[in-house]
Amino acid sequence: MYKKHLEFKHKVQDNNQDAHKQLAEVTAQVSELKQRVQTLEAIVTDSSYNVKQEINKL
C-alpha cells in the first residue's frame, strides 16, 4: 500500500515538473508575441506609414 502511495507521489511530482516546463515555454512565447505586437503597433501608428500605398505597391 505504501509502495503505491510513493509511486503515485512520484508521478504527481513528474507531472508538476512537466507542467512547470510547459508554463515556462508558454510564458516565453507570450512575451515574445507581446514584443512583436508592440513593434507592429508602432509601425502601423507611425504617421509616415501609409498602409494603402504599401498594399498598392504589391
Image (cartoon, rainbow, N blue to C red):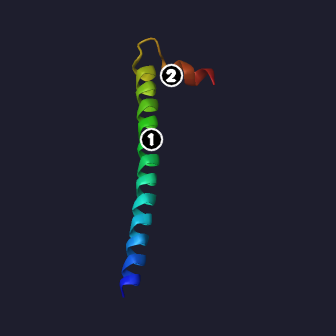
The nearer-to-camera label among 2 and 1 is 1
Q: Which mark is residue 28?
A: 1
Q: At x 46% / y 31%, what residue is drawn?
A: 36
Q: Position of residue 13 (x, y in %)?
A: 40, 65
The quadrant in which the C terminus is found is: top right
Q: At x 45% / y 52%, what residue is drawn?
A: 21
Q: Say which element carries label 1.
A: helix
Mark 2, other Cα within 10 Å: few <14 / some 14–19 / many ≥20: few
In the foreground, 4 or 36: 4
Q: Which residue in the structure is indicated by mark 2?
A: 52
Compared across the picture, whether 35 is left or right of 58 comes to: left
In this view, which residue lies farthest toward the right? 58
Looking at marks 2 and 1 on the same chain, the residue that comes earlier in the sequence is marked by 1
Q: Position of residue 24 (x, y in %)?
A: 43, 47
Compared across the picture, whether 51 is left or right of 5 comes to: right
Q: Position of residue 31 (x, y in %)?
A: 41, 37
**Quick check: 53 above or below 40?**
above
